[in-house]
Amino acid sequence: MEITVLFISLRLTLSWFELNSALAFDGFGLDLKQRAVYAEVNPVQPRSGSSVKCSRLSLSHPPAFSMDGDYVIGGVFSIHYYMRLVRHNYTTEPEALSCTGSIDARELRFSQAMIFAIDEINNSSDLLPGVKLGYRIYDSCSSVPMAMHSAFQLSNGLDQVFNTNDSCSQSGMVMAVVGESGSTPSITMSRVIGSLNIPQVSHYATCACLSNKQQYPSFFRTIPSDEFQAKALAHLVKHFGWTWIGAVRSDSDYGNNGMASFLEEAQKEGICVEYSESFYRTNPHSKIQRLAEIIRRSTAVVIVAFVASGDMRILLEELSQKPSTPRQWIGSEAWVTDPDMLRFTFCAGAVGFGIQQTIIPGLRDFLLDLTPAKILASSVLTEFWENAFNCRLGKTTTGKRPCDGTENIETLQSPYTDTSQLRITNMVYKAVYAIAHAIHSAACGTTNSTTECGSRITSQQVLNQLKEVNFTQNGYDVSFDDNGDPVATYELVNWQKGESGTIEMVTVGQYDASLPAGLEFTIHRNLSWQEGSTHVPSSVCTDSCPLGTRKVLQKGKPICCYDCIPCADGEISNSTDSLDCLSCPEEFWPNTEKNVCLPKLVEFLSFDEVLGIVLAVFSLVGASLAVATAAIFFYHRKSPIVRANNSELSFLLLFSLTLCFLCSLTFIGAPSEWSCMLRHTAFSITFVLCISCVLGKTLVVLVAFRATLPGNNIMKWFGPSQQRMTVGSFTFVQILICTIWLVVSPPFPMKNLTAYKERIILECALGSAIGFWVVLGYIGLLALFCFVLAVLARKLPDSFNEAKLITFSMLIFCAVWITFIPAYLSSPGKFTVAVEIFAILASSFGLIFCMFAPKCFIILFKPEKNTKKQLMNKNQS
């Protein structure tokens, strides 16, 4: 093994010619056996030009199948699962490399398909007429060292003794090589045979790295690159809304490069990965167990597996030991189309991309045509037969029963005989035909009649012609682009349970990378998911954030893990998984779900609502009461009680109270430019008129009793004319204030957007706050002055306690308006208007009840007291 590892490192770091020159030095530092191995691969050129004969060591690994021909095509397949480990003691000649473990029947079918294709070509009169193709097919044992060893053997030929002078001859070299099945072995082989310009056409190596023509100039393949499959898998995962997945891969060039491409595409699609683990079939069992536990404990329902078939078999066997929550497997073509994997029934519902399946006429009959002579002539077929039927051929000491001839391969249930899902087998078939067409173009393609098929050609010519091949075989176009890749087309494969309960591979869609963007992926049939469910499973770290919320990433976790936070007041989100909430326009407000902006409710004190109706009713009742009182007074205007209470001021007071009651109606309804100016000015002027009348009555009462003193002639200054002038003067001052207010900065209607977030309050802005408070201050000043005078006159011997009634009414008036100020400033929205109306009505009712109710009671219900004698008696008392 140490020699093999050293040999690999030298092969990867030194070119073929560098290795020749290095081996020419005696001081290279290699022991005899190591030099013998190098001599087997590349005989050292003699310095003096003399001929040296070299013989091959017995370390050569014989081909599994071979046939001579005019042109020989090489083949390398992973027929066995493992290579037997060889321990070196450096004292004896090491044992020859060999394979161990069971046979991969599918890979055996690939090798037989190559032989079948070559037989078809040899029997064809159109392709390579008169030319016999031969083949040398090696078993790489699913290992890199054996694949590299096979590449060297295909480069050297089968001669046991050769002359160093013939080192430049290609007599033993194959024209081209089909294989290998894995990407890593293919990379190793390409580095070996590529330096000799031997073309390599792989049927199953999908690593995108192999498209690099600078590193692998002679590599071609009939299977698409993983670059396309990675994009297809990412689109598939995104299509079904899976954003939280697990990822497992083979620890090889195929798995690592394929998964790297997939993760790059997945990141572009916003897909998060909970874990990404690698493993290989030769890893310790403890590592496989650890990976199985990671899968069992994970929260991701969907698992993307970029795994080789042999590796996947090991993992699924481990997972089957301890069932867990059903998982949705998304597979790469390496294992998802392998019929041998269908026995793992817990993977039912698996989805993945596979190469298009086809039918190769005659292949099944060829595979079943295993005669005893053919079986015994091949150690590989002998081992396959013995394992398939659990018997022994010949005198082997396996302990099995002898094969008695009753074995029937046609009834054998094996991937070898299963030709219902020919996918990769068709890639082998196309690879052989591509090489045959290249050889045909090189050997028979000229128009010169003297040139015949079978002329001597080199692998370099075949390599050049492979770049130009373009033909149709079995209904499929075969060609290579500048990178040696074919057009990428896949079938979407779904593992579904059949009527018999077994798992079947069903084609449910297509992926064609040659189609325009967005049209590559199509699904034309319903899929079956885990446990046979028809509902697409959900695999997310966090459920989608509903409308009305936004995403907030969880600290330290991938972007797919987040919390859903409700939008703040005044904001909405009208899409799921929104990153930000949108603010509503100023006059809009979110609905309850916060997913749409609706116009804000416009609010004002209207005649349609209960509060507005109640206040309007009280206003009308108050006005009616004032009018009724005035009517009573007018009807009894010559009665002593009316005449004794200054009937002119009383009528003016009742008129002003009527206006006070009615002006409150201007505060109800939608504000307008005129209503805003009217409500405040009308209210202020009528109230000043009202207070002026009360003030006039108070002065009359006070002066009247002061004037009764001898020699006092003051009453002449408070006659009717002076009273009218006093009321007019006080009122004129208020009119002047209001006029200035309306001219400078009048009240105006406005939309109050700050009082409530979800509502618009239609109200009247004051315009000038100073004007408003000056108006109120003037009313308050008159009321206070009137109240002071009423207090001074409260003990005067008025007939019907006029002074006391004025005092009490002013006390109510002042109390109402003093409490109005804080209530007005603290009331929100339309309630500000309601408070103002309440203050107007309360003070107006206070005045009318206190000053007129007792007199109306006497007039209507106590007429016997409404006499001059009664008034005089009261005055005398």
Image (cartoon, rainbow, N blue to C red):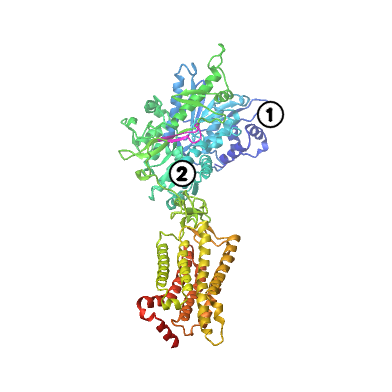
User: Which residue corresponds to the image point at 56% horizontal and 15% vertical from the top-left?
Assistant: 446
The percent coordinates of residue 551 (x first, y second) are: 50, 53
Outermost residue, top side:
449
Q: Which mark is residue 414?
A: none
Task: State the CA–CA distance, disc 1 to disc 2.
Answer: 57 Å
Tag 2 or tag 1, which sits nearer the N-term? 1
- Is residue 28 covered in magenta? no
- Give the quadrant of the C terminus: bottom left
Identity of the residue furthest to the right in this view: 48
Vertical position of residue 476 compared to residue 528: above or below: above
Q: Position of residue 753 (x, y in %)?
A: 52, 58
Q: Nearer the viewer, residue 340 or 772?
A: 772
Crowd band around label 1 with a 10 angstrom C-alpha radius: few (<14), some (14–19), many (20+):
few
**x, y percentage for residue 376?**
40, 29
Provide the residue designation for mark 2: 304
- Horizontally, residue 775 falls left or right of residue 512, namely right
Q: Nearer the viewer, residue 816 or 603?
A: 816
In the foreground, 340 or 96: 340
Q: Quadrant of residue 163?
A: top right
Q: What residue range appears in magenta?
A: 508-522
Asked whether residue 101 is in view, the answer is: no
Residue that carries the numbered disc 1 in the rendered image: 47
Q: Identify whether 148 is placed above or below 570.
A: above
Residue 252 percent across, percent down from the top left: 52, 41
Question: In the rendered view of the protein, which quadrant contains the N terminus?
Answer: top right
Name the amino acid, label 2. Val
Q: Secondary structure at mark 2?
A: strand
Confirm or deny contact between disc 1 and disc 2 (CB under 8 A): no
Q: Kindly report which numbered mark, 1 or 2, lies closer to the viewer in this rendering.
A: 2
Q: Is 517 contained in the magenta span?
A: yes
Amino acid type shown at disc 1: Arg
